[in-house]
Image (tube, rainbow, N blue to C red):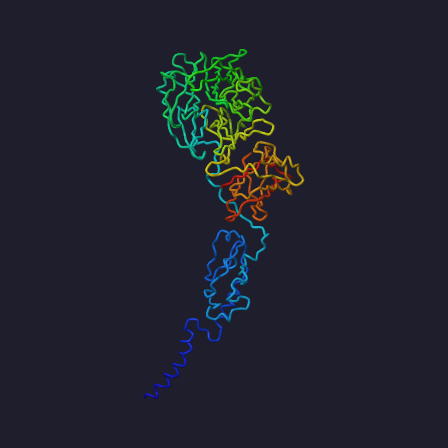
Amino acid sequence: MKKRLFLPLFLLFSLLLPLFASCVPGADPDGTQALTDAATAAERDAVTFPAGTEAPDATGAPETTSAETTGAPKTTEAATEPETEPATEPATEPATEPATEPATEPATEPATEPPVTTAAETEDPSAIVALSPSFLPSLSYMSNPYSSITNIGDPYILYTGGTYYMYATSGMKCWRSTNLKNWAPIGRVYDYTKCAFGQEKFWAPECHEYQGKFYLVFSAANKSTGRHSIGIAVADTPEGPFTDLLPEGAPLFSPGYSVIDASLFFDDDGKCYLVYSKDCSSNWVNGKKTSQSCAIELTSDLKATVGDPVVLSTPTEAWEKKSGNTLWNEGPCILKHNGIYYLMFSANYYATNYYCVGYATATSVLGPYTKPKNNPILQGSGATTSGSGHNNFFLSPDGTEIYTVYHTQVNPQSPSGNRMPNIDRLVFGEDGLLYVNGPSAWNQPVPSGVSGYYKLTEGVSAAVPGKDAAKATLLTDGLTGQDGLALGKTDAVTLTLDEPTRIAVLWLYPGQDAARAPKSVTVLINGKYLFENAAVPATEGAPLALPLLSLPAGVLTETAEITLTPKDGKTDASLAEIVLQYTK
């Protein structure tokens, strides 16, 4: 019985012995497993993966770094940081058998190990990578007009402490915003029911920061005469509450005729001026009711006037005489630039499409003023915008840009007292003339410095082979409302940046001729990253906003090559302005 059991047990042991041997860690008696692993690795490395992807790692999971997902070449860690501990190499290079390693990878000299390459690394570095635009960053732009605020007029914006405050003819109400995109109502900042001299029609409030205080100027119908007088109130914050500055709530200026639309101008020499409109309700010039822009000096404490008022402008030009027998120059304000005083004002009746903004210039704050030939500088089309007027100005947070705020009609084709605020950029041309990039009725880039978005205005040049170099510079002069540079299908605008920059949005403005606006735009960044055939908005005059945040992480813009696709049946297209919006 024992002999019968012994033979089967012996045979069973002989059969199981190889299986036990194969279970011993690291055991590979004949080397076939190592050869198989090496062949598998070589086969995996030889696989070519589609552009924009990366070879999977040993577990089969794809790499997910941002550079790899966009198709950018990747340098593996083994190539840039050679292993200093060969004993931890994979099983194909067992640390316990260094003699079996390939001669080209000696275990004792890891520094001489050649870089491990993947399919992505062997791609042509000059190959074009097609990208799709990312979503437009929500805080990079503002909407024009701001239709959430209606039934207002005569808007004014103050920027202080990182916040914008907007005041308007609206019952002395105020709104605040940090991004010019969303406005939060504050409510009434001055209780006009307690105004000593005014009884009704509180119009066009403006708030100015001066000597650590905030001063609110406005006009109101005088209780004793019914004519408008100008009042002034003071507060410690722009949100009020404002209280009358003068004893017993007396008006600041009440000359015996109606005065409205008060504004303050602080000159470089420390003098302050009250700028206002002599209202047509009680002012006649050459037999016609006429509103005129005027100014008078104030004392440094803003409590009294000095000297006599001076008329700065009166309606004299054809564009100012569109409203019959009543003429207007109203809503004045003064901006000083390079030693020149720019008086802006509105002409014609406010509830018509003829209402517009013009300007005059002088070398002295009290004139005489001359009206340039490019007037008016802001007027609605009558279709999408109407009644564009009563403007004022404010600076961008970084001080590099000037913007104007004004009102337009809520219903452009049915003008009334229902108006809403608008914001567009003011630009001084090289000719010294003043221009407005508007009125616009579309999204615009926020002023430079708002919400961390800045405009690249220096260190960038534009060139178009075969075109006049001077004309190419017009593409970066800040003016959007011009004819634009005509570009054929094969013409390309090349932007060159002095310093590599993280461009967030590329804004491209078509020329004024809607028929020659491009159908689409193609942009090549750094000669490698391609945004192809981005459609231009159908709205006349609206810019194309091309977000560039889908560029691979760490890629900064050095050059941008821009080509236009003309509309069907056209041989060329026009481009008026290029705006580069970047983040730091």
- Which residue is most to the left? 1
- Left or right of 518, for residue 352: left
Q: Position of residue 73 (x, y in %)?
A: 54, 54
Q: Residue furthest right?
A: 466
Horizontal arrangement in the rendering, residue 369 relative to residue 163 (left or right): right
Nearer to me, 268 or 163: 268
Q: In this orientation, which residue lies closer to the viewer: 83 or 209?
A: 83
As drawn, 236 above or below 578? above
Q: Indicate the position of residue 23 as horizontal and vertical percent values.
A: 41, 73
- Left or right of 296? Residue 1 is left
* 359 relative to 62, above or below: above
Q: Would residue 27 be seen by someone viewing this image from the given angle?
A: yes
| Placement of 102 over or under 538, stated as above or below | below
Query: Percent position (x, y) of residue 216?
Result: 41, 23
Q: Where residue 223 sits in the image (x, y, percent)?
A: 38, 14
Q: Quadrant of the N terminus?
A: bottom left
Q: Is residue 570 visible?
A: no
Residue 584, relative to residue 285: is it above or below?
below
- 36 lies left or right of 514: left
Number of disc labels: 0
